[in-house]
């Protein structure tokens, strides 16, 4: 696993994706929802990656999270919070 690299998400921006937040064991905290990622960027204090679904709604992933990335799936594990953020491309 690697740490977050913003460019790993470039292939997901302006694409229809499914996103979910899971616990460490992979159980849903919230169901997968269909979204379009419009942009990514760092938060003002530089500690989190923001993944925007419109111009004001986003979720923030700590930059210290470990990441597993492929062409069709991106997942970041925040060990401190025990949460896994998952983005999957829709077919």
Image (cartoon, grey):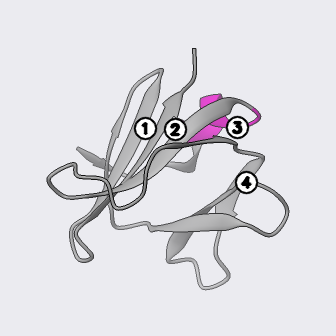
Q: Quadrant of the N terminus?
A: top left
Q: Secondary structure at mark 4?
A: loop
Residue drawn at the location 54% of the way across and 68% of the way down: 60
**Depth order, front residue of 31/53:** 31
Q: Which residues are magenta?
A: 8-14
Q: Secondary structure at mark 3?
A: loop
Q: CA distance from mark 3 to mark 4?
A: 10 Å
Q: Quadrant of residue 70?
A: top left
In the image, which disc is placed on residue 8? 2
Tag 4 residue = 53
Few, some or many C-alpha atoms within 10 Å of disc 1 (few <14, some 14-19, many ≥20)? Answer: some
Tag 1 residue = 74
Residue 75 to residue 14: above or below = below
Residue 91 to residue 12: above or below = above
Closer mark to the observer between disc 4 and disc 1: 4
Tag 3 residue = 13
Left or right of 2: which side holds 54? right
């Amino acid at each position: 696993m690697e740490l977050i690299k913003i460019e790993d998400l470039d292939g997901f921006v302006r694409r229809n994706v499914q996103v979910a937040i899971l616990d460490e064991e992979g159980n849903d905290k919230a169901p997968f929802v269909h979204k379009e990622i419009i942009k990514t960027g760092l938060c003002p204090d530089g500690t989190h990656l923001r993944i925007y679904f419109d111009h004001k709604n986003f979720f923030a992933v700590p930059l210290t999270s470990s990441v597993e990335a492929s062409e069709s799936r991106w997942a970041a594990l925040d060990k401190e919070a025990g949460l896994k953020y998952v983005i999957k491309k829709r077919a």
